[in-house]
Image: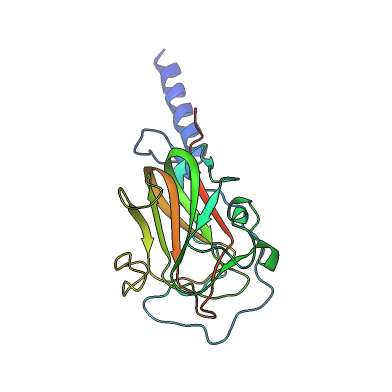
Amino acid sequence: MKKTMKLSLWALALTGALLPATVPAQDGKGTVPLKIDFPSHTLKGTPEDLPAGPNIEPISDKAPPPLQVPAGVVNVAAGKSATSSVPPFLGDLKQLTDGKREPIDDDAVEMKKGVQWVQVDLGKSFAIHAIVMWHDHRYVQAVRDVILQVSNDPEFKTGVTTLFNNDVDNSAGQGIGTDREYFELEFGKAVPAKGISARYVRGYTRGNTLSALNCWQEIEVYALPAP
């Protein structure tokens, strides 16, 4: 009997060692790496005079480590409606959630200069675990004043949570941020959301290192699907 129990315990230990690495989530469920199917790298090359400094992440040709999210999360922003501070002069806002984010003009939505925002309505509140945004990786560049917020208020007047902010001088008027700038690449920017409940996702920008214009390609919001 004792021999049988020892064999069973050994088998359980071996099985655990072979399973994919997961860590407990706050809600008691296991987490897994967020899987993203990255678009292609731009064919326009990398400028030699890229900005540098302590407030910008060094450029890398390797994808950053994936965020840990609960198993079973999906992109709940897919196909959802989007609005913006000003109408785009290139592209259509529905492209922000159409799943297309290749480094080509057909997948870009451009708006005039200044501080501008786009907003996605998820249709109802979700416990959001990660948001991934692509602004404009047709060119290797850094977008200015990238601010990502969520709320259940469509006007973002109450209950606003800022998940990312690299506006170091409050030029966008949403408060001083402590996040670093980064280069637009095929990896996009994945931001953890820690299960916060929200229906609306809003992203601010103020031009980039190559142009005063604003551009977005895609916003993906990862949450567990509605039961």
Q: Position of residue 186 (x, y in %)?
A: 59, 64
Q: Nearer the viewer, residue 112 or 143?
A: 112
Residue drawn at (51%, 58%), measured in percent from left and top?
133
Q: In this rendering, is residue 186 above or below 161?
A: below
Q: Position of residue 142 (x, y in %)?
A: 49, 74
Report the quarter where the N terminus lies: top left
Q: Nearer the viewer, residue 198 or 46?
A: 198
**36 left or right, relative to 125:** right
**175 left or right, relative to 187:** left
Residue 107 occupies which quadrant of the picture?
bottom right
Q: Nearer the viewer, residue 69 or 216?
A: 216
Q: How is the image coloured?
A: rainbow
Q: Nearer the viewer, residue 94 or 176?
A: 94
Residue that protrudes farthest toward the top in the picture: 1
Residue that protrudes farthest toward the front in the picture: 87
Q: Position of residue 56 (x, y in %)?
A: 42, 75
Is residue 192 visible in the rendered structure shown here?
Answer: yes
Is residue 104 visible in the rendered structure shown here?
Answer: no
**54 left or right, relative to 79:** left
Residue that protrudes farthest toward the bottom in the picture: 49
Q: In this rendering, is residue 165 above or below 96?
A: below
Residue 52 occupies which quadrant of the picture?
bottom left
Task: Count every numbered label the image shows and give the total.
Answer: 0
Q: Position of residue 207 (x, y in %)?
A: 49, 74
